Image (tube, rainbow, N blue to C red):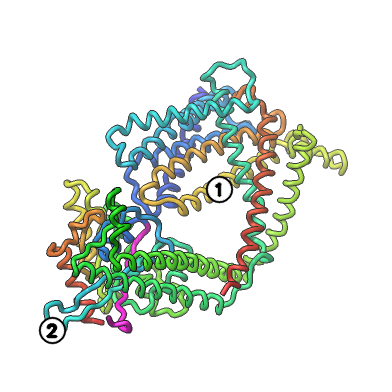
Amino acid sequence: MASLDRVKVLVLGDSGVGKSSLVHLLCQNQVLGNPSWTVGCSVDVRVHDYKEGTPEEKTYYIELWDVGGSVGSASSVKSTRAVFYNSVNGIILVHDLTNKKSSQNLYRWSLEALNRDLVPTGVLVTNGDYDREQFADNQIPLLVIGTKLDQIHENKRHEVLTRTAFLAEDFNAEEINLDCTNPRYLAAGSSNAVKLSHREEILFKRW
Amino acid sequence: MSFLIDSSIMITSQILFFGFGWLFFMRQLFKDYEVRQYVVQVIFSVTFAFSCTMFELIIFEILGVLNSSSRYFHWKMNLCVILLILVFMVPFYIGYFIVSNIRLLHKQRLLFSCLLWLTFMYFFWKLGDPFPILSPKHGILSIEQLISRVGVIGVTLMALLSGFGAVNCPYTYMSYFLRNVTDTDILALERRLLQTMDMIISKKKRMAMTRRTMFQKGEVHNRPSGFWGMIKSVTTSAPGSENLTLIQQEVDALEELSRQLFLETADLYATKERIEYSKTFKGKYFNFLGYFFSIYCVWKIFMATINIVFDRVGKTDPVTRGIEITVNYLGIQFDVKFWSQHISFILVGIIIVTSIRGLLITLTKFFYAISSSKSSNVIVLLLAQIMGMYFVSSVLLIRMSMPLEYRTIITEVLGELQFNFYHRWFDVIFLVSALSSILFLYLAHKQAPEKHMAP
């Protein structure tokens, strides 16, 4: 158990998209029974076997930092949140498939988190515009997760999924769409679990 | 013919107000959410439009615009529509959306929302009993009955908001109350916060490892479910699971601590920003205004107490009193009628605009603070209800600020309401609200510096 090696992954997204449920599902393989508002930041830990099956196999802990709040919070809350953005190894962006605004806000979330290292005074100087080039040389691996898949009607699924595919492309990230109340989506062997472990391996390679 | 012209003017202005309400809803309230039920937006904009039309009719009354009979007709119609919305439509939709959120009752939504609406109507009716607001000559479903009850609720709301606002306004404006916050304080708190997070993480790592070894050894740590499960867990409990519950308790306590630290840090950042703001020109200007408002607040509390103690309701409005004073004591002669009309127009206009603006700002803040993606529809409808009741009771109370000749239309349309009761009720609730806000702010202010001194 390496105590000095820390792998820190931020889980960002608007209020109410299901970050706490997602983190609970990822770390405890159980559905969160009574989700409530996240004040500040809640952390959970996921055990990962790096290079499983090879002689170099090592067990790591991935810390998932679930930061609560909205992009439109007061600047005092944003400054307080900024303390969590230090030395981040990966970011999971969560949006709600039933709410378009939450996916649009992901751009602002990623800017808030990624600009933290550039401006040490903690004051955010973004003009809110999204620039793909900023993400081109971004070293931090991103993963986009869409939640509440079960609440989308069958007919609309196709257009929603194409829209989210564009979103993931913008971020140069992998994407997963699921429903946090159903553990089946992340069950071992499912395509989502494969994507997840693939991302985790990238995380370790870069770190 | 003139009736048609007047009606078309009224309808145009109503459409304008409707558009404004629609824009406000989209740009301000529902900034971060997606509007899926357009019914909600329509209801909100309609309530806003009809409430503003009432104020517009008052202004027309003072200025003498439009034919007086068409004004009277529009008053009556407007009032009927607003009451219909506030008593029938909005409560029904609130019930409907509340029921839609509950998964169990999804199938029989309409039935349960009708039941909820009937319960609301029952309590709404009972509200009128303890208050001496009506003379008993009116029938059950007349305008006066409904307006009297809506008025009571609205006046209570107005007085609560005014009382709190009157006290909170100088408290936030004046820099005398600002605590001294340095950067080192903030850094120290942030360090504590990160240390707490680290402690939580190390404990969770232990828990995850324990759970993993237990899982590999074949013991499954499940919550004991059911009666027999609980009895079994008393006698046979694996040492691993005991450890887990202990650590879980420690983690819960640490998480609570981290939340507290987060909120305190945010508070310190906010105070630091306010200190920096108070050094600018705008800040100094607001500081000065704060002193002015605190005097005004004290005066209002004093007047409210006098009104209640001496059972006095002002007979003349401020405009006529002001004119009387200038004419009698200062000896300045001018055309009373002309000036009273214009001054009361300006005064009433200012009161209306500031109360609309203040209410919309308060509603927006409130909405941001408590809404989530599930409950946003219900909360917006509740806000529309509050807004409608607030505006209706503003009309009741504004009557006091207008000279006698302009009060007639309100008295005519609203029938024989006991207007004096409403003023007395406003004074009482204002006093209660202001005094409890002072107490509340005093306690909050006292408690804060002690929190930071704790190690």
- Check disc 2 and report the residue beneath it: A55
Q: Is mark 2 on a helix, strand or loop?
A: loop
Q: What residue type is disc 2 on?
A: Pro
The chain carrying label 1 is B
- The circle drawn on residue B357 is 1
Q: Residues within 10 Å of mark 1 (few under 14, many from 20)?
A: few
**Residue range corresponding to the magenta coloring:** A1-15
Name the residue located 38 percent from the left edge and 70 percent from the top edge. A112
Question: Identity of the amino acid at label 1?
Answer: Arg
Quarter of the figure with the C terminus of chain A: bottom left
Q: In this view, does B4 lie to the left or right of A199?
A: right
- How many angstroms separate mark 2 from mark 1 (CA)? 69 Å
How many marks can you see?
2
Q: Nearer the viewer, mark 2 or mark 1?
A: 2
Residue at the spot 62% in from the left edge and 63% down from the top edge: B447
Which residue ends up furthest to the front in the rendered image?
Answer: B235
Percent position (x, y) of residue B173?
Answer: 64, 61
Q: State the quadrant of the N terminus of chain A.
A: bottom left
Can residue B316 be seen by looking at this rendering? no
